[in-house]
Amino acid sequence: MPEKDRVLNMDDQTKNSGSDQPDDAALAADSAAADAEVAKLASDLNELRQTLMRRQADFDNYRKRIEKERADDAKRHTARVIEGLIPIIDGFEHALAAHREAEYENYRKGFELIYKQLVESVARLGVERIDPLGKQFDPHQHQAMDRTETVQHEDGTILQVFQPGYIFHGRVLRPAMVRVAVHPGGASKEAAN
């Protein structure tokens, strides 16, 4: 190879090696841009995952709240039905107490059977009867209709139940109507204070 061609060939190599350096820089810049884009996409993905988890938690809370509200609504509706049945139970009790004669015996047995079925059905729905005879007066469950001054019983003891009360899932549907024992002079002391 002549000298002149060798010099030209070296110049080409120099140019090629010089052009490799800008290609490396461009490649490094592209790599850095790609890394930045991957980091941004990873950050966006993480943010979307967090948002999805929050939305799932919100939906679960919503679902639980709706289920609780439905259960509460069902209890309220059942309580209204039971409140309507309580006077019927009272009527049965009064009818059964009124006719004790022998000629009403068959009639009475039928009434007792219907009464028993009605009371059992209401109890299966979750109703509890308040029958506080001999217990302490509780204004949350009892309504004092009368009071009797006596020292034979502790102050505040329920002496007679005029009408039983009913509780449905912890809520008083109707308070028991009662007569309460009061010690003589105890009420006047309270009134003086």
Image (cartoon, helix red, strand yellow):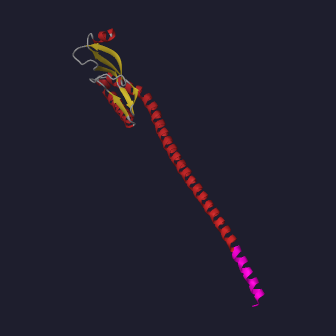
Residue 62 location in percent, x, y?
52, 43
- In the image, residue 174 above or below residue 55: above
Query: Looking at this view, is 19 or 147 the one in front?
Result: 19
| Near-viewer residue (188 or 34) | 34
What are the residue bounds of the magenta stretch? 1-19
Q: How many marks?
A: 0
Query: Is residue 165 shown to the viewer in this render?
Result: yes
Residue 103 at what x, y percent from top left? Answer: 31, 24
**Dominant secondary structure (helix, strand or loop) of the stretch shown in magenta:** helix
Percent from the top left, x then y, of residue 168? 40, 32
- Which percent across, then down, holds residue 42? 58, 58
Say whether residue 101 is magenta.
Answer: no
Side of 7 relative to 153 (left or right): right
* Residue positioned most to the left: 152
In the picture, measured across the screen, residue 143 lies left or right of residue 40, that is left
Residue at the right extreme of this rendering: 4
Q: Quadrant of the C terminus?
A: top left
Q: Identify which residue, 86 or 98, lies in the foreground.
A: 86
Q: Residue 122 is drawn in which quadrant?
A: top left
User: Left or right of 82: which side holds 12?
Assistant: right
The residue depicted at 49 percent of the width and 38 percent of the height is 69
Residue at the bottom extreme of this rendering: 1
- Name the image quarter holding the N terminus: bottom right
| Rendered view: 121 above or below 187 | below
Q: Name the image quarter holding residue 111.
A: top left
Q: Is residue 124 above or below residue 29?
A: above
In the rendered image, is residue 98 in sight?
no
The residue that appears at 24% across and 13% down in the rendered structure is 150
Position of 67 relative to 164 (above/below): below
The answer to which image quadrant residue 44 occupies is: bottom right
Residue, x 62% and y 60% (percent of image)?
Answer: 36
